[in-house]
Amino acid sequence: MAQVELIMPKMGESITEATILEWLKKPGDTVEMDENVLLIATDKVDSEVPSSVAGTIVEILYEVDAVVEVGKAIAIIATEGEGEGEAPVAAAPAVSAPTASNDTPTQAAPQHKHEVLAAAITGGPVSKSDENGRFYSPLVRTMAETENIGMAELATIAGSGKDGRVTKKDMLAYIANRENAQQVAVAAPAPQTVATPKPASPAPAPRLNSGGDTEIVEMGRMRRLIADHMVMSKHTSPHVTSFIEADVTNMVNWRNKVKGEFQKKHGQKITFTPILIEAVTKAIIDFPMINISVEGTNIIVHKNINVGMAAALPSGNLIVPVIKNADEKNLLGLTKSVNDLATRARANQLKPNDIQGGTFTLTNVGTFGNVMGTPIINQPQVAIMAAGAIRKKPAVLETEHGDVIAIRQMMFLSLSYDHRVVDGFLGGSFLRRVGDYLEAFDDKQTI
């Protein structure tokens, strides 16, 4: 019988490796085509891997918790119909061709001077691992030696890879910031008699004394990934947050009036989230430079408006599924998309494509009773908006008969944005436009 390799599939554009969580089959088990063989986890989402052929599991090549690069064989499946003893042949799974991982040089033309591995090595030797056991890949070590980054300095670099491993992306970001700091130091005037001190390395995190009244809980895999992503975002983007308060009385009254009929007619519960997303997409059309990403010194302007919405998982962690082409959907379409993604997020049934491609993110901190928040940007986006809890408050209204005080439904909105490319005028104007659309909500519209 022929032997076919089961290949670690590519789960998204930026996914280069995956961790094996559980084998659903063991050697000797039969498997049907498209039957799930194992569960894997990436830094984006957990997923099942189906078999590309029908046959018998001959060999499992990696154990649980192993980290495997995209494109590598992870199991051997024997199929019927051929003579025994044949060498394994690669299957033809319906997945994209594997791409190089963050720590593996490719044959493509270099996009950055530090990707040229043939550069002269001017730094000292760098070990495979440091005294704390953190592993450094050949590419990372080569980049460190090329840039005269010793082991002590390398240990201070925050890693976004598995178990805090430093990746090529981390090195490029660190080197770019290092060069900028050096350029500023050279440009700044200094007294001739005073030597410019070398910037000190970040101080190590203080150690806590754990006594009998404490409990040590290890971070789970997703919590570690979230922590690394948050630190990376603050390290990458200078955050600025602007706030406005919006009168959303018309929006609240309309939803209270139609929610029963809406569910009866369309089979969908309507929340405030799709209404907020509708206002966000309108404002993005007015201010397209909010819908961008930064790549080096280039600004990437996205033509599609893909709005991510923060959703809570059963574990208490958050995930951000994405509504693709949100500007092409009406309120009913947005409601269906929001409900579908939220339901599948709670059931851990999101697919990799569901959380990729976002260009702007909305988080509703009002769900937790918070009136406002300062959210952290979801890289590589440049802005994220938080919606606070809606509260009844006295407000001054201008009428044709003069100003009056009335009880209104008020909500704080905040926008955190990347001050490298979004200045206060753009960020503040965009946020104000979202508020204007919410305040002008048509409470007479039909469903």
Image (cartoon, rainbow, N blue to C red):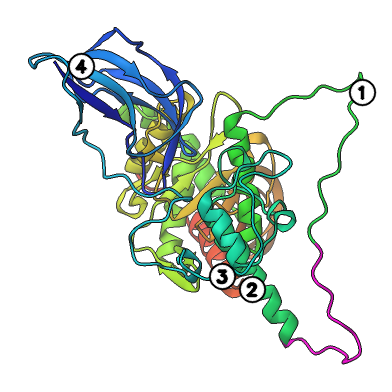
Q: Residue at x 61, y 66 (%)?
A: 175
Disc 1 + disc 4, Cβ < 8 Å: no
Label 1 SS: loop
For the view shown, which residue lies furthest in the bottom direction?
192
Camera-side residue: 204 or 109?
109
Residue 384 seen by the camera:
no
Residue 102 seen by the camera:
yes
The residue mark sitting in front, 1 or 2, is 2
Q: Earlier in the sequence, mark 3 or mark 2?
A: 2
Q: Which residues are magenta?
A: 187-200
Q: Name the image quarter holding the N terminus.
A: top left
Which amino acid type is marked by label 4?
Ala
Disc 1 + disc 3, Cβ < 8 Å: no
Pointer 4 residue: 78
Residue 90, given in percent of the width and then of the height, sits at: 21, 32
Pointer 1 residue: 211
Label 3 SS: loop
Which amino acid type is marked by label 2?
Glu
Q: Earlier in the sequence, mark 4 or mark 3?
A: 4
Q: Earlier in the sequence, mark 1 or mark 2?
A: 2
In the rendered image of this protein, does residue 351 appear above or below residue 62? below
Disc 3 + disc 2, Cβ < 8 Å: no
